[in-house]
Amino acid sequence: TIYTLYVVRTSENLWGSADSTKMFSFGEFTYNTNEGRANFSVWELLLFAVLGALGGLAGAFFNHLNEKLTKWRMKHVTSKPFRALEALGVCVVCSTVFYAVPCLWRRCTPKPLVQVTWTDFEKELVEELVPFGCPADSYNEVASLFFTDSDTAIKQLFHFRESGVFNQDVQTFSSLAIATFYVPYFLCACLTYGIAVPSGLFVPSLLSGAALGRLVGHLLHRLDGNSGTFADSGTYALVGAAAGLGGMARMTISLCVILLEATGNVANLLPLMLALMAARWVGNVFNHGLYDVHIHLKRLPYLEEDVPHVAAERAAHAAQVMAADPVCFAPLVTVGDAYDTLRRHKHAAFPVVAGGGSTQLAGTILRQTICMLIEHRAFGAPGDDPTGRPDLRTRALSPLLSAAVFERAYPKFPTVEELRVPEVDRGCWLDLRPYADTAPATVQDCCSLARTYRMFRTLGLRHLVVVDSANRVRGIITRKDLDEHTLLERLAWTDNDNGEDLETFSVEAHPSTMARFSV
C-alpha cells in the first residue's frame, strides 16, 4: 500500500523529485499552541479521560449491536446469492439515509469569512463545505459532513476553530448538526461491517468519534458562556476520534502513534493516552474488542496470551482435550498405504512410531514431506515387508531427497490431490526415517492444561504429541483443541452432577496420574 501511494503521489511530476508531504495526514495542529504551550489546561485531562470513557461506552454499544447482527447473518444469510443481495440492500439503505438526512436539514449557514490568522490548509477546508440546497455563499452543515470524503470531514471537525472566546469563534457546525450526523452514521457503520464486501472501520470510527468529541467540546463552550475556559473544540474532536476507535477496537499504543503521526503535534500525546486507556478500560467492562468478537464468532483458532479461565478453574489435563488415538505411520510404509492415509485424513503432521506393532513415539513427519517423496518417487522397490533387515540399521531403504529439492518447492508443495500413483507403485516401500523429526515437542498426558497451553503458544507449535510415561502415543493436540470454545465443550461438567469437588473429579478423570507411583 505504501509503495502504491508513493508511486501515485510522485506521478504528477513524472517520477522526478519525490513528494515530501505525508501520505497519510489529517493536518497539523499548528494553531493550537501559544508560546510553546498546549492549548488545553492540565485540569482538562480529567475531561479528556471522561471523553475517553464515553468513547468506550459507544464502542461497547457498537460491538454489541454488530455482534447481534453478525449472529443473525450467520444464521439466515448463508448462501452467496443472499450475501450479494444483502450487500446490495445495505448499499441502498446507507445511500438513502446519507441523502435523506441532509435533505431534512433545511437551515443554511453562511460560509465563514477567511481570517488573516488562518493557514492555507484551513482556507482550503472552507472550499470543501457543501452548499446542498443553499445559496452559493452558504452551506448545509449536515451535507458538508455526509457528502465529502471521510478524511475531509475529519479534517473539518479537527481544524475549524472554536476556542469558546466571544466574538472570536467561527461557528461552522452546530451541536444539533453534529448530533444529526453522528447517530445515523454510527448506525450505518454498524450495519455495514460484516457484509460480503471489503470494508473497514478505521476511518468510520475516527469520523464518528471526532463528531462525538466535537459535540462535547461545543457543549462545554456553550456551558461556559463563551469565555474561553476550555480547549479548542478541534482538540476535543481529536481526542474523541481516538476514543471512538479505541472503544471499538481497544487499540492503545498503535493508535496513539498513528494519530500523533497524522496530526503532527506531540503536545496531544498525554490527552490521547488518557482517552485511549479510559476507552479500553470502560469498553472491556462490557465486551471484547470488535475484532476479538468476530474471531470468537467465526471460531478461528486464535490463542490469547492468557490461559483460558476454564483451563485453570477446572484443573484440566492434556489428556482431556487431546485428539485420542491419532493416525500414526510406521517407519517403513508402502506408497499405497501412505497415499490412502493422506486421502482420508487432512492432518498436517503424523506421529511416527517405533514399528513392530509398538506405539512408542519415534518422531513426527509432515504431510508435505510425504507428498514430496511420492511425487519424486523417492521410494524403494516393491516386495515383502523389509522390516527387520539388519542392513537397514545403517542405511535408508529408498533414495534420499536433498534439502535443495524441498527448498525449490517451498512454499508450493504438492498436495495429495495433485499426486498420481499408478498401481505398479502402490506396493513400493517408503522409508520415513531420514525425514522424520526425531525430537518433536511432546507433553505427557498428565500435564496440566495451563502448562500445555503456555508451551504450545510460546513455542508457536502447530501440533503437540501427547505421550504416556512409557513414551507411547496417546493423542495429539492442535491449535483448535486449545480454542476457548473447544475447551468449554470438552471440559463440561457432564460427569460431575453429584456435587463432587474439583480435586476428586480431576483425580478420577486421570487414573494414569496415580499409576505413576508405587505405594
Image (tube, rainbow, N blue to C red):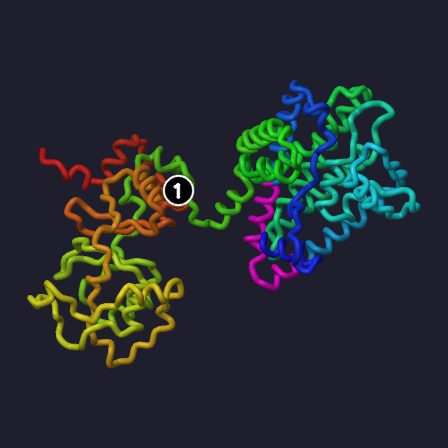
491 and 128: which is toward the camera: 128
165 and 456: which is toward the camera: 165
Query: Local crowd at mark 1 within 10 Å, few (<14), some, or many (≥20)?
Result: some
Left or right side of 6 for 400: left
Residue 444 higher or lower than 44, as above or below: below
Quarter assignment of residue 283: top right
- The residue lying at 78 percent from left, 35 percent from top is 160
Q: Quadrant of the C terminus?
A: top left
Question: Can you give x and y, in whole percent of width and height, for residue 166 in the image?
Answer: 85, 23
Farthest residue, direction left: 390
Query: For the residue labelled by badge 1, is the local secondary structure a helix, a strand or a loop?
Result: helix
Left or right side of 127 for 512: left
Q: Quadrant of the N terminus?
A: bottom right
344 and 123: which is toward the camera: 123
Residue type at numbered disc 1: Leu
- The question of residue 72 being in magenta is answered with yes
Question: Can you give x and y, in whole percent of width and height, for residue 23 in the image?
Answer: 65, 48
Quarter assignment of residue 319: top left
Residue 155 appears in the picture as rendered: yes
Left or right side of 480 for 245: right
- The residue lying at 67 percent from left, 46 percent from top is 21
Residue 64 appears in the picture as rendered: no
Q: What is the magenta range?
A: 63-88
352 and 346: which is toward the camera: 352
How would you classify the magenta stretch by its main secondary structure? helix
- The residue lying at 88 percent from left, 36 percent from top is 113
- The question of residue 210 being in magenta is answered with no
Q: Mark 1 points at which residue?
A: 488
Residue 313 higher or lower than 473, as above or below: above
Question: Can you give x and y, in whole percent of width and height, for residue 155 in the image?
Answer: 73, 40
- The residue lying at 28 percent from left, 71 percent from top is 374
Question: Can you give x and y, in whole percent of width and height, for residue 452 in the image?
Answer: 30, 41
